[in-house]
Every structure is written in C-alpha cells, then in structure tokens.
C-alpha cells in the first residue's frame, strides 16, 4: 500500500501541464484555468484534436450530443457552434422556478394560452415543500392551479405537508423523479428549470438547465434555440475500487478541469468503468457536469439503461452513439484503479483534495441527500460503511431521501452482508437521524425552517453538489463535498475520513 | 366549402392587422407591433376575439433600427462600480431562501432586487451592494473576475441584479446559464472584458463609464481605460427588453397564435389543427395554398385566411 501511495503521489504532484484546447471560433466563452498544481498522473496526456485531413473523418461524423440535437432540429448534420431550433421532448419545472415560468408564459402568450403539449410538461414540486413559509406553500398552489387549468398530465402534487406518505402523487426531487417515472429516454431532449437537469444525460439524452424565460418560451412553442456544444470526452477505464463511487470520479474530473473547464461544452463519459456503473451512479456522474460549467453530460445507453427503463416507460426511444471518427475538442483518459476517495473543500466544487489528507478537519455534521447523493444506491453505500464499522456516529447525521421510492427502499431493501437488515435499521443502529421527508431539503439551504439547514457556521461533510459560501444556509458554513462512503466514514469518526478506514 | 384564393400581399395583411390592433406603438421609431393573441373556439360561428396583447412596460428605449449594432448613444452607463472576484455563484447573487419570490410578479420582482448580493460573505465584501434600509443599489456597474454567475440556473439571479438597478456586469467570463438568462430577460448586460485580472485594478466605489458602442470601460478614479469585447447579437436583445420583446420588435415573430382543437376544411381537404403556438415569420406568410403538407403551413394558410375573412364564412368552416 505504501509504495502504491508513494508512486502515485510523486506523479500526482508533478508539473502542471498545459492542455491545448482547440480554438473554436464560435466559442465566445473560453474556460479559465486556475494557475495551480493539478492532479494529472491518473490521466493520460490530453490528445490534441484531430484535424479532418489527418483523420480522414467522414463529413457527417458527429458526437452523441451533436446527433441528438441534429435529430431534434430535423437536420442531417450539425457542427458545434451552430444555433438551431430544437424540438423539446420533455420540459420539467418545479416549485421554485415554475411560478415564474408560468408567469412569463401567460404574459407572453396570453392569459388563456394553452401549453404546447400537456403530456410533455412534467411539473414536480420538490424544493421548498416541508416548510411553513407561506410563499413557498403558495408556489405549490400556483403550480396546482396551472396544472388543473392546462390539464397537465404529469403533476406530482403534494397537499398534506405533515405526512408525505399521504400524498400518493408526490415524488420528491425532480431529477430522480424524472428518472424513476420513465421520463428520461435515450436520444431525447429534456430541458428543465434547474441546473442539475444534466442529471438525465445518464440516459444518453441531451438534458440541460434553462431559466424561466426560456422555459416559458418552450411551454408555448415546444422549441428552443440552442447552440450546439463541442464535446469533451472522458474515457474511464480500470476496475472501480470498492472504496470509490461515481461521486469520486466526478470530483476528480471537476478538480482537474476547474469549475469553468466545461463551460458551453458537452461532457461525454465512456469506457469500461462507465459500462460497469449502474444507472444511479451514472446519474451522479452527469449530475455534477454543471459544476464544471458543462452544458450537458452524456453516457451512451446500453443494456444497463434498457434494463432500468423496462418497467418505467413503454414509449419508444432510439438511442444514438458517437461516430467512431467524431471530433472531440479534448479527450481525457482516466485509470480509475489509481484514484482515491476525494472531497471538494470549501468553497468550490473544484477545490479537490484527497479525503485522507483532510483527516484533521473536525466536522460538526454530515448530510446525506439530494439528487446527487440521496438516491437508493447512495444510501446503500452509506449503510455499507456503517455496517462495516458497527459503531455509532459521532456527529448529527442527516438523511434526506430524494424521493418517496428511495424512502421506501431505505425501509425495505436488505443491505448485502447484513443478514437481512434494511438501510433504515442500520442507520438507526448507527445513531443517524431518522430519514426525513423526501425533497431537495437543505442542499440549497432553503427557507429558515428547512430540515437540516445549516443555520450556524458549522463544518459539514455532504453528498450534495455545491459548496459555495452560504449554499446550505449560513454564509460562514464550511461544506466538504464527498461520496456517500466518505460521508458515512466521516460521520463515524467526527473528522473528514477516507472510507478505506472502514471498508478495507 | 371552397376557400377563396388568398391573394393578399403581406403588406395588405400588415395594414389590416394594424388597424385591428388597438395597441399603439411605444415609440414612433419602432416598427408597428403585429403580435396579437388570437383564439378560435370550437363552435363554428364564434368570431375570434382580438384581445389586446399584454406587455409589461419596457423601461428602455428601443433601438432605432433592427440592425445588430447597439445604438451607442443609449448604451452608456456611468457611476460607481462594485468589484468582485472569480466564480461568484448564483447563491451569492441571490441566496436560495429568497427564491420563494416569483420574478414575474411586480412586487416580488422589486423585493428580489432588494436582496441582490446579500449572499456575499461580509468578510470579503465589507461594502454592501445595497445600503442598509435601501431597496436599490448605488452601483449601476458591476466588475467581476472569471466565471461570473456560476452555479444554479436560477433566473432570479440576473433579475435581482436588474431589479436592484444595475445595468451591466463587466466580467472576464460568464457561466453559460447566467449569460443566457441575462440575455433572455434583458435585465442586465453581461459584457466581457479583454483584460484578465481587470477586477484587481478596480475598487468598489471607483467611478466608471461603460461605453458599449465603443467597447470601452473607463475608470475615472484610476484614470485607466480597458477594452471590452463586443456585446454582439446579445446587445439588441437586451436593449429590446429580452427575447420575447426582441422577437416581436424585429418582426422575427409576427404572431403568437393559439388554437383549440379544430378541423379545418378547405377545398375538401381536412386538416387536424392541434392546439399549439406557432412562431410565424414574415417568410412563411405568403406561401401558396397548395403548399399545405406541413402543419406549419396549414396554420399559415388559416391565419392569412382569417385575417381577411374574420367576419365571414371562413370562420364558419372551422368546426370541432
């Protein structure tokens, strides 16, 4: 073990390398690199992009993202940088941006206007639900009124705030609900009024976040003008160590390319490691694409995808795949077997550090939840660490399942190797808080009375997606982003902790 | 029932529209607005109601021409600047707890403005963006580093800045969604500067002038001048007040039309017209009757028909 660490550390702290980014004349916004040492050893040197003459590329070779947008704009071929009118397959909105979107829709198209397709809009209250904040509650009412008026087919309503289980339609966190309810399908275009809409790229579709005005426009017309992004390709190979999760992979990448490294670009994830990930892990990966500035993330659809979708949708879909000689502006190769558990230190998702190097950081609390880290697989992972330890947590550990389905899984699925215990039992034995009502919860702070909101300047290890100042509530709060393994390990020790302390 | 041949020229169409439209143009230099909201009910003899379009007042002048150049005489901003560093994310611009405010409601729009930048850590930013007790900012210009507006997609962010009274951000680079939202709403100009580290040469309170037409930033306090990247196509969109206003003003979109489910019978051809909104540009108007295979053209025919025959017979042909 020591020699492995020595070998990797000397390579890790090697000289920084200038990555050559192909000049892309249509790119108005170039990423900006931090001038600091970067962990490069685990990634092969980036390849410079092939010129057409050198590779003999077919004129119509396209990346996945380009193909999806081409089909959606009814064009045979697209190049990055083109602005095209895209037909939208699904538009999603929630309680924070929905009312504003509806306001714009009505103002621009008329008070009596009808949405473009009542079956293609999915409205999911999920952000500020279990709160006494009157405006927050009113916003859900606004959604309901609109859905009734427009006869929106998919509205996951909640009325009884005191008991989420009393609301059969209510789901929870929008991105996970979209996946679980079969709204994510390969090859399609999904837009949502939320930056983590890119989560759905895990299904091999084009999914990205938009603002209220754009969404209002889509609501009326079913189309949006989009600029075709060039693609960064990430090839992840190697056997996934048993102490690593997809969260570590994406933290590795964001730390590599910085929070603006993928601005206006698509991030494509391929390789044997990716093929070995289940859908929820793929979602975690694509979920944080926006944290690198990315426009969208994609994972090619395969048997894992089709199996997941089997019982969720009966709609036909047609997956697309990058051509062999598609052009990527940058390609990164990662040997996953060489990676170690990571955290993103305050106050930026690209402030990457090895978990084991933060072991002296005393923490006040742990938060396991959100679209990024509150899915069934995330809770199973945390349970695995608690089970391996057998001890109790040393700090308050908040568990917020993303959706009702996740909540039910926590209370019903047996955890492997536990002799039939459920996650909930293991969490209880470890002294965690009782799993809370499913919603976005404190990932973004929210109204003051939000469960697990950080109202004091504390140190928190969290499975969420952002740690900018004030993200979970208090401006002086310190948030360490981590995988569920690392979060659980940290809860057990009271310090930022590498999960290998418990898993090996 | 046979339909009369449609022979009207687009200009005739425009005039008849304009006559129907109660809404006077905002400024005489603007082209007449042709948008209207037209609803067909399913009963055969119901006339379409031409309701006056609903607009929010546009605070800014509209450009004299539809060219893509920003009119230099109106795109100058002057006053104290507020200076920030790199990676200012949308949670710092408008923290999540204020997102219960709905930007399309006027009173809540104003409230959002009063909370702009309230998320900034006070240690790093000791001068508040909005003075205690005030609801508007004294800083019409914001100067920032790289990746301004990163993080969440919340449109509340550029809205808060615009509602607070800021007119432009001068930054090294922008996060994608923030940039797009700024343009779509027309709330604030997201201008890029050429110089890396410009923000380090400015101090909050410096008096600056932004000349968009000249692509220049002048810091009067330090005496330095900086080159800005041209705002380009985004300029006229923001100038007009956002994408919807721009689309109408430049005639890219003449009509937003909604129809209920109905079946149109023209020359014994029956088309199912779905309840959708269509963007019709001047180019699609004027297509001959024979070109009706695409639904978009169906609507085109229908609408031109209705414009000429809204009191007549043609409407009677529309039945559910």
Image (tube, coloured by chain):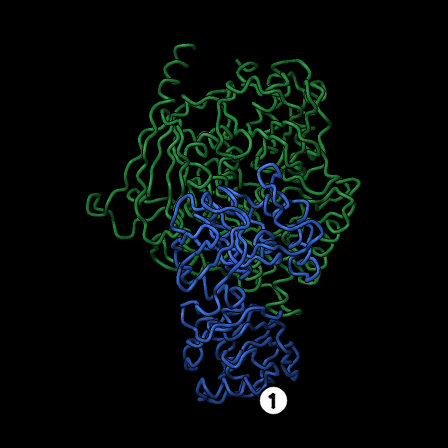
Chain colours: A green, B blue
Name the foreground residue: A499 vs A186: A499
Residue placed furthest toward the top: A2
List x then y, in percent, for residue A343.
Answer: 52, 26
Give the side of residue A336 with respect to residue A399, left or right: left
User: From the viewer's perspective, is residue A47 above or below residue B142?
Assistant: above
List x then y, in percent, for residue A161.
Answer: 77, 43
Name the foreground residue: A156 vs B21: B21
Name the foreground residue: A296 vs B319: A296
Specify the subunit that label 1 lies on: B
- Local crowd size for mark 1, using a 10 Å CA cut-off: few (<14), some (14–19), many (≥20): some
List x then y, in percent, for residue A460.
Answer: 63, 28
Name the residue located 43 percent from the left edge and 68 percent from the top edge.
B72
Name the residue located 65 percent from the left edge and 16 percent from the top edge.
A419
List x then y, in percent, for residue B19.
Answer: 57, 87
Which residue is denoted by mark 1 in the rendering? Answer: B311
Confirm whether residue B224 shows in the render.
yes
Q: Give the total of numbered labels.
A: 1
- Quadrant where the N terminus of chain A sits is top left
Name the residue located 32 percent from the left edge and 36 percent from the top edge.
A19
Give the side of residue A36 with respect to residue A154, left or right: left
Give the side of residue B173 with respect to residue A495, left or right: left
> What is the secondary structure assignment of the residue under circle 1?
loop
Asked which quadrant contains residue A443, the reply is top right
User: From the viewer's perspective, is residue B16 above or below residue A131?
Assistant: below
Give the side of residue A39 with respect to residue A436, left or right: left
Confirm whether residue A314 shows in the render.
no
User: From the viewer's perspective, is residue B310 above or below residue B39?
Assistant: below
């Amino acid at each position: 073990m020591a020699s492995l660490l020595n070998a990797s550390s000397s390579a890790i702290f090697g000289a920084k390398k200038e990555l050559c980014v192909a000049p892309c004349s249509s790119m108005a916004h170039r990423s900006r690199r931090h001038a600091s040492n970067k962990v490069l050893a685990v990634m092969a040197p980036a390849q410079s992009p092939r010129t057409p003459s050198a590779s003999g590329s077919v004129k119509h070779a396209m990346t996945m993202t380009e193909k999806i947008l081409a089909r959606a704009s009814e064009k045979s071929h697209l190049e990055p940088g083109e602005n095209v009118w895209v037909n939208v397959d699904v538009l999603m909105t929630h309680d924070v941006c929905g009312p504003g979107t509806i306001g714009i829709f009505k103002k621009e198209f008329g008070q009596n206007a009808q949405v473009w397709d009542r079956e293609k809009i999915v409205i999911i209250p999920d952000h500020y639900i279990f709160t006494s904040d009157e405006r927050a509650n009113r916003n859900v009412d606004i959604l309901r009124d609109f859905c009734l008026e427009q006869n929106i087919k998919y509205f996951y309503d909640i009325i009884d705030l005191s008991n989420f289980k009393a609301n059969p339609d209510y789901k929870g966190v929008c991105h996970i609900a979209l996946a679980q309810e079969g709204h994510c399908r390969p090859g399609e275009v999904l837009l949502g009024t939320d930056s983590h809409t890119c989560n759905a790229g895990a299904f091999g579709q084009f999914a990205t976040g938009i603002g209220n005005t754009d969404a209002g426009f889509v609501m009326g017309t079913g189309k949006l003008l989009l600029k075709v992004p060039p693609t960064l390709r990430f090839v992840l190979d190697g056997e996934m160590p048993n102490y690593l999760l997809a969260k570590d992979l994406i933290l590795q990448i964001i730390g590599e390319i910085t929070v603006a490294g993928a601005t206006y670009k698509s991030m494509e994830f391929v390789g044997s490691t990716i093929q070995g990930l289940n859908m929820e892990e793929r979602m975690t990966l694509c979920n944080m694409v926006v944290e690198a500035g990315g426009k969208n993330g994609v994972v090619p659809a395969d048997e894992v995808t089709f199996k997941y979708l089997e019982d969720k949708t009966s709609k036909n879909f047609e997956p697309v795949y990058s051509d062999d000689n598609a052009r990527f502006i940058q390609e990164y190769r990662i040997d996953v077997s060489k990676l170690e558990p990571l955290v993103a230190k305050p106050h930026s998702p690209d402030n990457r550090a090895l978990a084991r190097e933060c072991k002296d950081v005393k923490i006040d609390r742990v938060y396991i939840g959100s679209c990024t880290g509150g899915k069934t697989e995330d809770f199973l992972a945390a349970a695995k660490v608690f089970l391996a330890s057998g001890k109790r947590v040393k700090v308050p550990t908040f568990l917020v399942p993303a959706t009702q389905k996740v909540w039910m899984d926590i209370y019903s699925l047996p955890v492997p190797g536990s002799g039939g215990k459920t996650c909930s039992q293991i969490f209880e034995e470890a002294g965690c808080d009782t799993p809370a009502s499913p919603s976005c919860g404190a990932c973004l702070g929210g109204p003051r009375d939000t469960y697990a909101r950080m109202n004091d300047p504390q140190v928190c290890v969290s499975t969420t997606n952002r740690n900018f100042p004030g993200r979970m509530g208090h401006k002086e709060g310190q948030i360490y982003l981590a995988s569920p393994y690392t979060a659980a390990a940290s809860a057990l020790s009271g310090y930022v902790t590498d999960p290998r302390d418990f898993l090996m | 029932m046979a339909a009369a041949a449609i022979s009207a020229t687009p200009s005739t169409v425009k005039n008849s529209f304009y006559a129907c439209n109660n809404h006077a143009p905002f400024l005489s230099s603007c082209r007449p607005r042709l948008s209207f909201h037209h609803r067909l009910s399913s009963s055969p003899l119901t006339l379409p109601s031409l309701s006056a379009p609903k607009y929010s007042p546009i605070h800014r002048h509209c450009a004299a021409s539809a060219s893509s150049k920003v009119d230099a005489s109106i795109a100058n901003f002057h006053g104290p600047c507020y200076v920030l560093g790199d990676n200012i994310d949308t949670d710092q611009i408008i923290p999540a707890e204020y997102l219960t405010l709905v930007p399309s409601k006027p009173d809540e729009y104003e409230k959002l403005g009063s909370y702009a930048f309230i998320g900034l850590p006070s240690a790093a930013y000791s001068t508040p963006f909005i003075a205690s007790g005030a609801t508007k900012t004294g800083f019409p210009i914001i100067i920032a580093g790289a990746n301004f507006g990163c993080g969440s997609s919340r449109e509340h962010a550029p809205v808060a800045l615009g509602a607070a009274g800021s007119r432009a951000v001068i930054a090294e680079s922008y996060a994608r969604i923030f940039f797009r939202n700024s343009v779509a709403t027309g709330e604030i100009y997201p201008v890029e500067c050429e110089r890396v580290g410009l923000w380090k040469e400015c101090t909050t309170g410096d008096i600056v002038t932004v000349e968009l037409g000249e692509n220049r930033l002048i810091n009067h306090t330090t005496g330095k001048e900086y080159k800005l990247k041209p705002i380009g196509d985004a300029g006229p969109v923001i100038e007009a007040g956002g994408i919807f206003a721009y689309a109408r003003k430049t005639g890219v979109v003449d009509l937003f039309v909604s129809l209920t489910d109905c079946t149109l019978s023209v020359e014994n051809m029956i088309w199912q017209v779905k309840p959708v909104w269509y963007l019709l540009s001047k180019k699609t108007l004027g297509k001959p009757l024979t070109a009706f295979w695409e639904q978009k053209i169906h609507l085109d025919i229908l609408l031109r028909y209705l414009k000429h025959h809204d009191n007549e017979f043609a409407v009677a042909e529309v039945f559910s």
